[in-house]
Amino acid sequence: MRRRKPQEELALTPVRVRAGLAQGRLDSLRAALPGAAAFLKRRRADLLKPDEIADYVALDWLSWEGGGLKLTATGENICAQSLRASAMAG
């Protein structure tokens, strides 16, 4: 049996475990992501809490690019899912 490389093991680990987040924290970050995206569009990343930024980056929902924060493709998908879920609930 072939041994997996460390990066392969990491890829198989759930995102929340890789980021060290509890399910409740992950849920609150998911719900708050559309608001965070709105701050980024207005160039107001300063309104995000540093621990939120760290968690979003660890989850690969945001990334640092050219000294600024940007939604990743994953972040855009999570944001869209969150908006759809809130629209269906309300």
Image (spheres, rainbow, N blue to C red):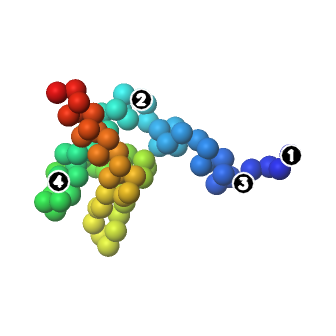
What's the distance in space between the residues labelled 1 and 2, CA to CA?
Answer: 33 Å
Q: Which residue is mark 4?
A: 39
Look at the image and tell me in which quarter the C terminus lies.
top left
User: Position of 1 compared to 8: left or right?
Assistant: right
| Residue 16 visible (yes or no) | yes
Classify mark 1: helix, strand or loop: loop
Q: Which residue is mark 3?
A: 5
Between disc 1 and disc 2, whose residue precedes?
1
Between disc 1 and disc 4, whose residue precedes?
1
Disc marking residue 1: 1
- Residue, far bottom: 66
Query: Whole-percent x and y of residue 73?
Result: 38, 57
Look at label 4 and name its amino acid: Phe
Residue at 27% from the left image edge and 66% from the top image edge: 68
Between disc 2 and disc 4, whose residue precedes?
2
Look at label 1 and name its amino acid: Met
User: Position of 46 compared to 31: left or right?
Assistant: left
Q: Are marks 2 and 4 in contact (CB under 8 Å)?
A: no
72 relative to 65, above or below: above
Query: Whole-percent x and y of residue 14?
Result: 54, 39
What's the distance in space between the residues labelled 2 and 4, CA to CA?
Answer: 24 Å
What's the distance in space between the residues labelled 3 and 4, CA to CA?
Answer: 38 Å
Q: Are marks 1 and 4 in contact (CB under 8 Å)?
A: no
Query: Whole-percent x and y of residue 49?
Result: 24, 47
What's the distance in space between the residues labelled 1 and 3, CA to CA?
Answer: 13 Å
Residue at 26% from the left image edge and 38% from the top image edge: 84
Q: Are marks 1 and 2 in contact (CB under 8 Å)?
A: no
What's the distance in space between the residues labelled 3 and 2, CA to CA?
Answer: 27 Å
- Residue, far front: 88
Disc marking residue 23: 2
Q: Are marks 3 and 2 in contact (CB under 8 Å)?
A: no
